[in-house]
Image (cartoon, rainbow, N blue to C red):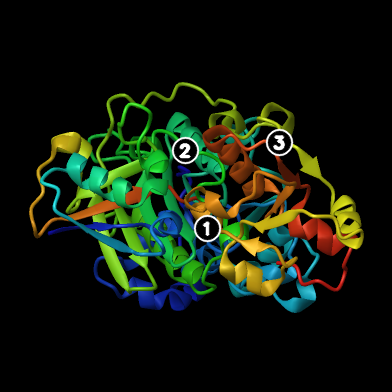
């Protein structure tokens, strides 16, 4: 933190009185918050409660990293934003909102992607980082940048009904650092196994719950109040309302010496580098249907996606494809589709590799392409 | 019998079941039991050498098996085995 200590004005003392009268917190805790600089990466689901509560609590400087604009589909959970703001910059809109909530704080907008090129420069300007990003490459980048810059990384992530929270790279009293994200997960899952919120969905209130816990850990780490969630992983399942706290140990094999190519690390390559599968366009599919050609159409999405919109294909969700090969013809053209073409390509690769299929075609762009180019009345999601 | 908690991202391979009961006496036996019953899970939990993949953590109670006896860690009827996957959502 900065060596120049700002003290609280009478108006701030009044504003933060509910903090200051907590014996463990006191004026000292509030002044630590005022003098702290926190970088919040992502101002979406987790970023919304994080920024609102950190601003309300009086964290003196809040940095916001986000390059995105507000979309209709964000409003189900990103409570920083309103209908009137759709299409506007998330970072700028977030700044306006939290600055109105608390004029005593300084809000810095970094309207950019968080990349290998700017990560260290950004992180080094702050005392602590709160990770509210939404993909594995950035998760590992945030972690590694925090380890290299010697910053605490208050981590949270969400998926459907489940949330995880931990405090990584926390500085212990003896100056050593606690476990980081790579100690817990040395490598990321292969692309597609754990879908993002946009592919897999998330309960709208979940980021509110988990992001608020993340904000609480940020405040604890900055003030030294309480026991931080370092060396532990908190798990929450809203569906069953179950919580667990698991131990996280340092892994002696974890070595972070430089920032790397995180897309490559997470197995994300340009399409050309993946094993190619045969493709068919939505126009070609439409033509086959109009000509009443004999072919089989397989939909590898989940039943709840099928209910939103479908092309009348046989529903065999990706996880059940290999158990249902008896239903998939080897004698005629079989067109496989999903939402965007990724899962269907995975299904085709598995069927070709493990079961010798040679008659499978991936619907390029999936049902989204059909909705965009053939039937514009079809709902998209 | 010990109980294995299946995380949401892997439930598509277990007919959406969130728990699995096993007679396995060790983590290795329990995972083998699970992946034999739900064979679509195997490649997501185990690598080609039958080792647990590094993007999955297995906990017995609240301890990572890597701090115990790894997949030789003994389990009993009252043991809860958790499969913890990395998730990245935040949006």
Lower sequence index among marks 2 and 3: 2
In the rendered image, is residue B58 in sight? yes
Local crowd size for mark 1, using a 10 Å CA cut-off: few (<14), some (14–19), many (≥20): many
Q: Do the residues labelled 2 and 3 touch (CB within 8 Å)?
A: no
Which mark is nearer the camera, 3 or 1? 3
Lower sequence index among marks 2 and 1: 1
Residue placed most toward the observer, A270 or A97: A270
Local crowd size for mark 2, using a 10 Å CA cut-off: few (<14), some (14–19), many (≥20): many
The residue sitting at 75% across, 65% down in the picture is A311
Residue placed most toward the observer, A379 or A176: A379
Q: Mark 1 points at which residue?
A: A60
Residue A40 position within the rendered picture, expressed as x and y whole percent measured from the top left: 55, 53
Lower sequence index among marks 3 and 1: 1
Q: Residue A188 — which label? A: 2
Cα separation, mark 2 vs mark 3, equals 24 Å
Q: Mark 3 points at which residue?
A: A277
The residue sitting at 72% across, 53% down in the picture is A340
**Which quarter of the image is occupied by the N terminus of chain A?**
top left
Residue B69 position within the rendered picture, expressed as x and y whole percent measured from the top left: 13, 35
In the rendered image, is residue A195 in sight? no
> Which chain is home to disc 2?
A
Residue A178 position within the rendered picture, expressed as x and y whole percent measured from the top left: 29, 39
Residue placed most toward the observer, A308 or A184: A308
Rendering quarter of residue A308: bottom right
């Amino acid at each position: 933190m900065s060596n120049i200590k700002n003290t609280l004005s009478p108006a701030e003392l009044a504003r933060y009185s509910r903090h200051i009268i907590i014996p463990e917190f006191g004026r000292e805790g509030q002044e630590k918050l005022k003098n702290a600089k926190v970088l919040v990466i992502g101002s979406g689901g987790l970023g919304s409660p994080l920024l609102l509560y950190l601003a309300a609590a009086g964290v003196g400087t809040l940095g916001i990293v986000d390059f995105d604009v507000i979309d209709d589909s964000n409003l189900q959970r990103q409570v920083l934003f309103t209908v009137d703001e759709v299409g506007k910059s998330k970072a700028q809109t977030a700044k306006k909102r939290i600055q109105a909530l608390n004029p005593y704080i300084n809000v810095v907008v970094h309207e950019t992607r968080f990349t290998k090129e700017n990560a260290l420069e950004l992180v080094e300007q702050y005392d602590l980082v709160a990770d509210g990003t939404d993909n594995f490459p950035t998760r590992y980048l945030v972690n590694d940048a925090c380890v290299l810059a010697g910053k605490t990384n208050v981590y949270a992530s969400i998926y459907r009904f489940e949330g995880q929270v931990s405090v990584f790279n926390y500085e212990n009293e003896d100056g050593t650092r606690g476990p980081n994200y790579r100690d817990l997960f040395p490598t990321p899952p292969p692309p597609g196994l754990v879908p993002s919120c946009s592919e897999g969905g998330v309960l709208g209130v979940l980021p509110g719950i988990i992001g608020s816990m993340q904000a609480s850990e940020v405040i604890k780490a900055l003030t030294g109040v309480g026991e931080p969630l370092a060396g532990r992983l908190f798990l929450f399942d809203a569906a069953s309302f179950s919580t667990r706290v698991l131990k996280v140990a340092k892994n002696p094999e974890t070595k972070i010496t430089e920032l790397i190519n995180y897309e490559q690390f997470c197995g994300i390559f340009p399409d050309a580098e993946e094993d190619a599968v045969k493709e068919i366009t939505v126009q070609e599919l439409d033509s086959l249907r109009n000509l009443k050609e004999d072919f089989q159409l397989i939909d590898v999405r989940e039943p709840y996606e099928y209910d939103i919109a479908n092309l009348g294909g046989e529903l065999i969700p990706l996880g059940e494809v290999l158990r249902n090969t008896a239903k998939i013809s080897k004698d005629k053209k079989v067109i496989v589709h999903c939402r965007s073409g990724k899962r269907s390509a995975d299904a085709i690769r598995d069927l070709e590799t493990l079961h010798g299929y040679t008659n499978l075609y991936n619907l390029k762009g999936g049902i989204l392409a059909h909705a965009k180019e053939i039937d514009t009345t079809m709902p998209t999601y | 019998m010990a109980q294995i908690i299946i995380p949401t991202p892997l439930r598509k391979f277990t007919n959406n079941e969130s728990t699995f009961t096993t007679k396995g006496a060790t983590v290795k036996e329990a995972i083998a039991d699970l992946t034999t019953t739900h064979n679509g899970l195997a490649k997501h939990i185990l690598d080609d050498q039958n080792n647990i993949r590094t993007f999955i953590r297995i906990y017995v109670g609240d301890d990572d098996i890597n701090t115990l006896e790894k997949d030789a860690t003994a389990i009993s009827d009252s043991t809860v085995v958790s499969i913890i996957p990395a998730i990245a959502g935040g949006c």
